[in-house]
Amino acid sequence: MESTNQHCMILLVLVLILACNVITASSASPASKRFHFNVEWKQVTRLCHTKSLLTVNGEYPGPTIAVHEGDNVEVKVTNRIAKNTTIHWHGIRQYRTAWADGPAYITQCPIRGGHTYTYKFNVVDQRGTLLWHAHFSWQRASVHGAFIIYPHLPYPFTPKIQAEIPIIFGEWWNADVDAVEGQMMYGGGPNSSNAYTINGLPGPLYPCSAKDTFVRAVEPGKTYMLRIINAALIDELFFAVANHTLKVVEIDAVYTKPFSTLAIMIAPGQTTNVLLTTNQAPDASGMFPMAAAPYLTSVFPFDNSTTLGFLKYKGPKSSDKNTKPSVVVPNLPKMTDTPFATKFLNKLRSLATPQYPCRVPKAIDRRVITTISLNLQDCPQNQTCKGYAGKRFYASMNNQSFVRPLMSILEGHYKNFTASQLTSTFPERPPKEYNFTGVDPLTENMNTEFGHKLLVVPFGTNLEIVLQDTSFLNPENHPIHVHGHNFFIVARGFGNYDANVDPASYNLVDPPERNTVAVPVGGWAAIRLKADNPGAWFIHCHLEQHTTWGLAMAFIVPNGPSPSQCLLPPPDDLPSC
């Protein structure tokens, strides 16, 4: 590995030297956009409860990053708290800049208190709505914000938009999220938040929250783009606006074939852009409620409440301040409406035009089948465990429960460490074949193995990963996020995946392209990607409690054969462990 890195570096230097002697008049340098994030505490009150909340620049949610396609981006992050932190630019591909990806102990050591790290990357061949968030512990609960990439070309959909409205879903916790996480790290059961939020505000259905309600003024007869982001820790969410139709035009910063719907389902880590035309006749209040409520597939404790905001039509009918607006959204799905979630997700298709082609791999070099499971683990001797029947709750992929190492996996890979904790032996098949979605969890549940086994995928591999849900403890809709690569969801189904039957029904024409897939409850999803981004990359459930329990893995993509396919050297200010 070390010789390969040296070879790539030598070739890269030669290419740069030659390039410096060639000046092309028509070439335009990309713009550089610089931002400064201060991670700091701020006193914030919600639900009549005041607490110290971790924020960026004192904002909750954090500041929006807005750039243009092709820009170079630098974000200087100063950690002004005593705890470690990192920032992840969720959905940014980070081609050759894995050092800027952000997950702690995967691509970097954390930024220690009082220290600074500058994330440097460019935005290439991506446009639309993404998000950024902390990727250390449960700091994502309040450290998150929108990442907007404006396109060079006009939008490939109609009608023309007059304005845009970012909508970020989150959760408010009265408790200290570090304490909630700490309980789970030792096998305790999950807790639930106290409220869902829209742009940090719970809305009038929660105690003391009438004034903490998101209200956006709109003009009748206009078309607005809603940039919808699910930054919640725990739940997939349904979203709808009373009496209005939503036109889906983009998911995870990729254009889609437009279609109309009364509501959407959006998982943590996912983004969805929709068009909304203000073509309804308002009542005396002039207010139309918009609501987000959980899509529930778990028997574990959950927040079954609803966050509410309002679109306020401008005009004479909206001048009666004594008229209370309705808080009912009749087109919001019921919280257990799996048929609606399935139908909605099945409608998503890549735009697949010559200008925006669908580059799904038609053939594969490798197929990895992995179970995604919640597990019961035997309690260690002389300990008291707070899980079920005296055991501990954990989670796994192919019976491997991921534990972060005490070093950065990417740095260990780059420096060719041969430490025993970095092994390339992640199993590519489940250790045992059985009815994954029909087992009795109390009799079939197996103890997991703990560690961080890695999957090594040669550069350029057309990789298929089949994610199989199981009924251990509880079948659940799992949002699985892949770092460093977009992928194509070529198929989803219920029950057990059958490699001899199911590939025949794959969509290899216009499957949706995403960075986070919602694996169906009691079912499976098959995704395909080209492993052409060198580095170490995290794959994990974006339900934070499941990642805490170990529902994660990491994979390595070595350097490619040319200088432009090599991981860049680590920056000088890369944090150390």
Image (spheres, rainbow, N blue to C red):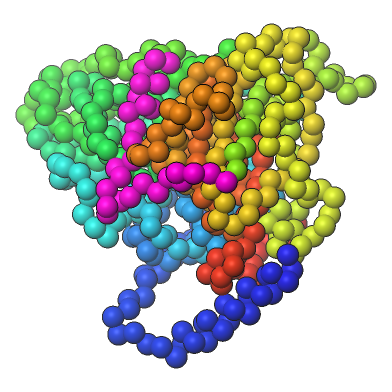
Q: Nearer the viewer, residue 223 or 429?
A: 429
* Magenta stretch: dominant secondary structure: loop
For residue 127, above or below residue 576: above
In the shown orientation, is residue 229 left or right of residue 151?
right
Which residue is located at x 33 percent, y 50 percent? Answer: 357
Report which quarter residue 310 is drawn in: top left
In the shown orientation, is residue 421 left or right of residue 277?
right
For residue 33, above or below residue 198: below
**What are the residue bounds of the magenta stretch?**
338-365
Report which quarter residue 472 is drawn in: top right
Q: Is residue 352 magenta?
A: yes
Q: Nearer the viewer, residue 219 or 231?
A: 231
Q: Position of residue 465 (x, y in %)?
A: 57, 37
Q: Position of residue 275 (x, y in %)?
A: 23, 36
In the shown orientation, is residue 344 left or right of residue 39?
left
For residue 543, above or below residue 418: above
Location of the N terminus by quadrant is bottom right
Location of the C terminus by quadrant is bottom right
Q: Position of residue 285 (x, y in %)?
A: 16, 22
Residue 503 visible in the shown view = yes
